[in-house]
Image: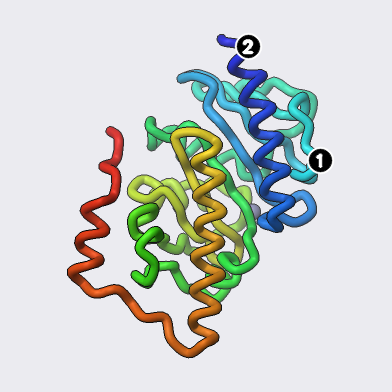
Amino acid sequence: MDWQKELMLCQEIAKVGKRLWQDGLVAHNDGNISAKIDNDWILITPSGVNKGALKPYQIIKIHLQNGRIEGNSKPSLETPIHLAIYEIRSDVKAIVHAHPPYATAFAAAGIALMEPVFPEMIVRFGEIPLVSYATPGTERLAEMVAEVIQDHDAALLQNHGAITVGRNLEEACGLMEALEWTAKVLWLAKALGNAIPLSPSEIARLFSMRPKPAQ
Ligand SMILES: [Zn+2]
């Protein structure tokens, strides 16, 4: 294993934790972040740690095949979600789970972010579906999230929060910020009384501009 890559990823995860916390996308000890080192190992944030104060040495290592855990504390409660996604999407190298306020409000109201209002949203996400509620930390929730993430890079988790994936930590974190921006501005537009959807031909054009999924 490449220890330099591992160290760099631990530092990057800590930076992403601070960014999410500073942006108000996670509160207290909420949220979790992971990244793939290679085909055998992932790094994941520990349970019960404030993401704004997360240190690189606190990050836990998990073996994808045999489940071996290396680290000084317990891995995140939502580890099953991360493992289920890495198993199903070989192109995913990083995952961010957070509780962004506006996106989580949509999730609490049971509303997926499917309205085709913003061009960037369509090009980036296509759509942001809603995963039905299951108890946090359970295999059931992990299965349901993986099923949706199989065809999407972002989803809302009903009564809970949101999840984004990427080819690296920067992408997964950036998508979480973009997801929250979408929810916030859609909320504001609705408060003004209208969020005008793009025309079907424009939606089709934007969908054709989406990067093709890696297989
Ligand atoms: Zn959560």
Q: Residue furthest left?
A: 201
Q: Nearer the N terminus, badge 1 or badge 2?
A: 2
> What whole-number distance in Å separates the C-alpha atoms at marks 1 and 2?
23 Å
The front one of 33 and 174 is 174
How many residues crowd around disc 2 within 10 Å: few (fewer than 14), some, or many (20 or more)? few
* Residue at 65% over, 24% down: 61
Up-down relation of residue 98 to residue 204 (above or below) = above
The front one of 186 and 65 is 186
Tally the numbered discs: 2
* Residue at 25% over, 51% down: 209
> Within the displayed image, which quadrant is ligand 1 positioned in?
bottom right
Amino acid residing under circle 2 = Trp
- Quadrant hosting residue 106: bottom right
Which quadrant would the N terminus be assigned to in this image? top right
Amino acid residing under circle 1 = Ala
List x then y, in percent, for residue 70: 69, 20
Give the left or right position of residue 163, taking residue 202 as reference: right
Residue 81 visible = no
Mark sitting on residue 53: 1
The front one of 205 and 158 is 205
Up-down relation of residue 117 to residue 85 (above or below) = below
Mark sitting on residue 3: 2
Up-down relation of residue 69 to residue 80 (above or below) = above
Q: Secondary structure at mark 1?
A: loop
- Quadrant hosting residue 196: bottom left
How many residues crowd around disc 1 within 10 Å: few (fewer than 14), some, or many (20 or more)? few
Label 1 close to label 2 by CB (< 8 Å): no
